[in-house]
Image (cartoon, rainbow, N blue to C red):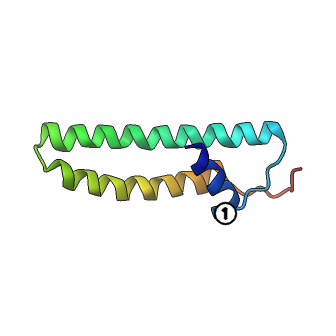
Amino acid sequence: MTFAYIANKKYVFKSYVSNIKGILKEAGSFYLARVSTLLIEMVSMFIFVTCFHFDANIIKLLNQGIVMILNYIFSKLFVFKKTSTASS
């Protein structure tokens, strides 16, 4: 997850937050977003596989696409959001 944070920060969203407080806030938000999508995936697997008896492999595949999209959206809107003022 740390590698994903660094790669997203540097290459995907080009975040220039460099002070320790900003980095800790950004990283904390990133980890929280990733844990949130993990929980969404786990609940979805439980509901569709355990309760509704759908094929686990198909649901897992669909969940991976949904989680990937949600990770991007959460990162874009909540983690690496652009600010109107430059911070150093």
Quadrant of residue 82 within the rendered picture: bottom right
Residue 14, quarter of picture: bottom right
Which type of secondary structure does the marked residue at label 1 adopt?
helix
Q: Is residue 83 left or right of residue 71?
A: right
Q: Position of residue 78 (x, y in %)?
A: 61, 48
Q: Is residue 17 left or right of residue 80?
A: right
Location of residue 6 in the rendering, given as x and y in whole percent from the top left corner = 66, 51
Q: Is residue 11 left or right of residue 55?
A: right
Identify the residue shown where x is 71% and y is 38%.
25
Please tell me how crowded label 1 is: few (under 14), some (14-19), or many (20+) other residues with Cα within 10 Å: few
Residue at point 89%, 50% (across, down): 88
Q: Please, is residue 45 above or below residue 82 in the view?
A: above
Position of the N terminus by quadrant:
top right
Of residues 1 and 31, which is closer to you in this image? Answer: 1
Residue at the left extreme of this rendering: 53
Q: Position of residue 72 (x, y in %)?
A: 52, 57
Q: Residue at x 62, y 40 (%)?
A: 29
* Residue where numbered disc 1 is placed: 11
The residue type indicated by label 1 comes to Tyr
| Residue at 54% across, 51% down | 74
